[in-house]
Amino acid sequence: MKIRRLTIADHRELIKLWERAKLPIKARGRDSRTHIARELRCNPDFFIGAFDGALLAGAIIASHDGRKGWLNRIAVDPDYRGRGIAKLLTTAGERALRRHGIRIFGLLIHVRNRASLSLARRMGYVEHDDIAYLTKRDGEHI
């Protein structure tokens, strides 16, 4: 498994991976080629993929607000799950954020995703049951 930064040339494969992993996709919004290209120009270190030959088997997107980093959209192809790829990607995301001076990392995981919750706990992430997650969107495609 080779871990490397993604480029805009990987966009189509990234979308295919998210489809295989059953992640929601905002194809006309935040996940469009145009939007991803803009994010890549601003933060090229934060889009990371795990490749088995030419196949994108897993990916993660990191982000930060200047003080706290976030590991987002962690996806592993269903045929590759259970091989440690999510852990490799999470570690790579943390490493990328550390290079940018970030020392606090956050994850948002659906409560029904027991495998991801278990992995996060094993990696030292602490669950906070006293925090509510809320969002407000300027459109349905965002």
Image: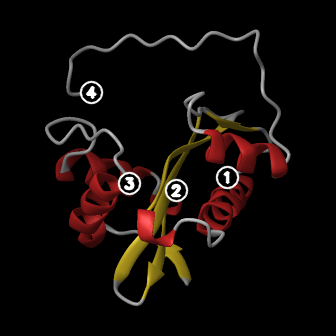
Element type where label 3 sits in the image: loop
Callout 4–callout 3 Cβ contact below 8 Å: no
Q: Which label sits on residue 97? A: 1
Q: Choose mark 4 or mark 3, whichever is in front.
A: 3
- For label 1, the crowd category at 10 Å Cα-Cα, with few meaning under 14, some 14 to 19 and many 20 or more, is many
10 Å neighbourhood of mark 3: few (<14), some, or many (≥20)? some
Considering only vertical position in the picture, is 2 above or below 38?
A: below
Q: Position of residue 113 (x, y in %)?
A: 57, 38
Q: Is residue 136 left or right of residue 60?
A: left
**Of callouts 2 and 1, the N-terminal one:** 2
Res 63 seen here: yes
Q: Disc 2 marks which residue? A: 46
State which mark lies toward you, 3 or 2. Answer: 3
Q: Earlier in the sequence, mark 1 or mark 4?
A: 1
Image position, residue 37 (x, y; %): 27, 55
User: Could you give the CA–CA distance between mark 3 and mark 2, rounded to whole angstroms?
Assistant: 20 Å
Q: Position of residue 88 (x, y in %)?
A: 66, 68
Residue 101 visible in rendering: no
Q: Amino acid at mark 2?
A: Phe
Q: How far is disc 2 from disc 1 in space, using C-alphas? A: 8 Å
Q: Quadrant of the C terminus?
A: top left
Question: Residue 93 appears at what percent x and percent y?
Answer: 63, 57
Element at label 4: loop
What residue is shown with label 3?
A: 21
Mark toward the viewer: 1 or 3: 3
Residue that extends furthest to the bottom in the rendered view of this protein: 53
Name the residue tied to disc 4.
142
- The residue at 17%/42% (across/down) is 27
> What residue do we see at 47% from left, 53% from top?
43
| Label 3 or label 2, whichever comes before in sequence order | 3
Q: Which residue is painted at 51% across and 76% down in the image?
A: 4
